[in-house]
Amino acid sequence: MSVLSIRDLRKHFVLHNVGGRRVDALHGIDLDVEAGEHVALAGSSGAGKSTLLKCVYRTDLPTAGTVIVDTDDGPVDVTALADADLVTLRGRAFGYVSQFLRAEPRRGALEIVARAGQARGMDRDEALDAAASALGRLGIDESLWDVYASVLSGGEKQRVNLAAGTISPPRLLLLDEPVSALDPSNRDAALDLIADLTDQGVAVLGVFHDLDAMRRLASRVVLMRDGRIDRVGPPDVVLDELTGVAR
Amino acid sequence: MTLVHDDELDTATPAVAAMPESTVASSLTPPEPEPVGILDEHAKREVRRAMLSAVCIPGYQVPFGSREMPVARGWGSGGLQITLALVGADDVVKVIDQGDDEGVNAVNLRRLITDTTGAEETTEVDEATVIQTRHRIPEDEPTDDQVLVLQVPVPEPLRGVERDMMELARMHAEADYARMWVSLYEDVVRNGVITKSTGYPCLVGGRYVMATTPIPRWDVPRLHQSPFLSLFGAGRERRIYAVPPLTDVEPLTFDDIPFEVERTEGATCSLCGATEAYLVEVPASRPGGEGRWTCSDTAWCRRRREQNAEEAS
Amino acid sequence: MISTERQVVLEVRGLGKLFGDQDPGAVVRTGPELGTAKDPQGNTVVAAWDVDFEVAAGEAFGVIGESGSGKSTVMRMIAGDVTASAGTVRLRKRDRSRVDLLGLTPSERRALRIDELSIVHQDPADGLDLRVTAGGNIADPLTAAGWRNFGQIRERAAELLTRTEVPLDRMDDLVKTFSGGMKQRVQLARALANNPPLVLFDEPTTGLDASVAAGVLDLIRDLIESLGIAAVVVSHDFAVIEMLTSRCMVMQHGRMVEQGVTDQLLEDPIAPYTQRLVAAARA
């Protein structure tokens, strides 16, 4: 079975602070992501890409539909999961990498990444080793490993996020603009890392604005518009249509 | 007081008014008076009840209605009330103050007791039935048919760490002595040792923490499993507590900081030569001169001197 | 599935407190929909009602609300400082037995505070004896739990002070000479002395300067994660809740308005009141 099965996922927001205005973000999404597959979500801003990702992670609470994740203990409907179980599931089976470093305590990058590994079941030494190699691979200099992460640059923070989200490869990796703040060479290293994960069997659902990144990584591109899936296909087909490039 | 029957009268009745004046006068004459007590029977009963409660709950401070005594508060009125409630004409009382039978306070108390109860007095421990003391347990250990009565100024061992009465009651009731332990910890941190000299807190019968005031540390180990009954009276604070015979009395201390008694290296009594007794320092009689040591227990010291003299001759 | 591995340490069900006349009828006349916790028909105040949540070992649960929300009352009922009017508060003790805290005598409650449940107060003076040294404040719960070896007490106190980043050369200083942030760290060390399974944090950094607060929050988060304690964090400050907790609930006028995973409550608040609170915090 698919690692991720989304069925008829709907999400609307009711903004009580502006008189109860309703915003419909997702109108019934059906999507599967298999192990070893990289599905890229494309589309203009407001299409619902980030919302979809957040609904899978349940940072946004789906209004209707199901999000089934295949875990080591069997399939789990994220929308129906008890809060405490969701917290555990996230630590164990999900990787979530966004542009932003969540309010982090004064910890060094190595520690942040190692702890993520430990949450996934690694023991301390294993986690430290894996963290060191992940950071090295993403070009974070060793001199920065013990510095409080809050003083790192945007690009450095993003790479730390990526390392933390991908250490001990999770079953499902959710990426929300993971390389937007990186300069070309760091971006390449990051994309390589992500590509390797797919090779290792991780199911990846990613949001990129970067067409090149999508072309490089995605096995399928899902084009979204106004909260619906418009088009699904191989990257070159969908993206060429998007950009109007004839091949 | 009893009415004396005149031989010519059958009964002591109102008919006495009809009798000749000389017989009325003799029938109204009181007999040789018995000693006038300071404590009436009600007061004695209350003190005895408090003592019984105290003996039943070793180390627990029993409140009692402390009476006005012809002794200033803080000068042994509590101990005095216990002794007065205990003794009668058959008793022999020894009273010491700082170990000395001849201290002013000891002399006054002893006179007061013997005058008002008909009890005998002594300076020898083995002759006494009740020993009242302000500061020492006599070097000759009391036996199982003697009672030690101690005068206590401050009965509450937790006084240094808590003032509120309700809270104190709760702490004793719940055996919550953490604040006491913290103050011992702080003492060791500040001074390297536990510095309490008198009134050393002890755990009695494994349950209540008790103040051993007024005796010095030297005498504290002697309460543990003692053959004699110790009664503690605090008149001003209105509390009586007790250590029954053969009760565990353990000075509070940390496992790795043994309880130590006062000891001055090389000090001996200049009168009898004792080294293993509680010694007090007598200041030099002239400025620049040296002080000397003498036994705190004067009666014991005197007997030793008498023995030394006998052996010498 | 995953639940079997969770060890629930604290289970709160139907917890409620009525002040004043304590008229149970006041419950239907008060609440968020009615905009008040005070009974319009009398002087009963429904300070808290129908509060339900649970916390497992290694989890931190947040309680957010403005003043008057009932969050402090909930904390005090769990702590035992206020007698509850309704509900149960089940604690899983170190020996794995479960006890309803509300059925215990004050004396039994006090005994629990030695090594089963600790509280870190907003004002460190409420959780410390300022006239005693830092080490002495830690010796307190240790001796209450039966520690009698001075050397071992010192060692454990030093260990805890190091863990809470208090300089060891201040271990023998009176706590009243410490800064606010340092006092809070000593309070933390003391609260953890006997490894309690449950620790309550009541506005742990309110009143501290921002930079000092950040350090203390870091420390608390670190301790919660590494010691595997169950924590309840009460605060009016979303930043604190976000930093420290994985799940939380919002209270208003004595009732639970919303409960969920912390980042979801902040990112996608559903209840109107929660949205207002989050918007105000983000502003």
Image: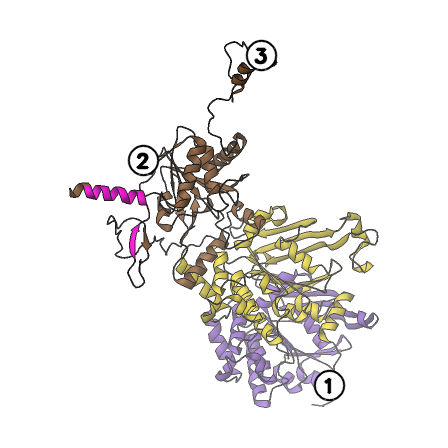
Indicate the position of residue B255 as horizontal and vertical percent values: 38, 54
Which of discs 1 and 2 lies nearer the camera? The answer is 2
Residue A17 vertical placement versus B199 (above, below): below
Which residue is located at x 57 percent, y 76 percent? A198
Which of discs 2 and 3 lies nearer the camera? The answer is 3
Which one is earlier in the sequence, the residue at label 2 or at label 3?
3
Query: Where residue B25 is drawn, which disc sits there?
Result: none
Indicate the position of residue B264 as horizontal and vertical percent values: 30, 56
Q: Which residue is mark 2?
A: B126
- Element on which disc 3 rests: loop
Which is more toward the observer, B73 or A26?
Answer: B73
Residue C182 vertical placement versus C40 (above, below): below
The answer to whether residue C242 is left or right of residue A121 is: right
State which chain disc 3 sits on: B
Q: Which residue is mark 3?
A: B19
Residue A232 vertical placement versus C255 (above, below): below
State which chain disc 2 sits on: B
Label 1 and label 2 in one chain: no
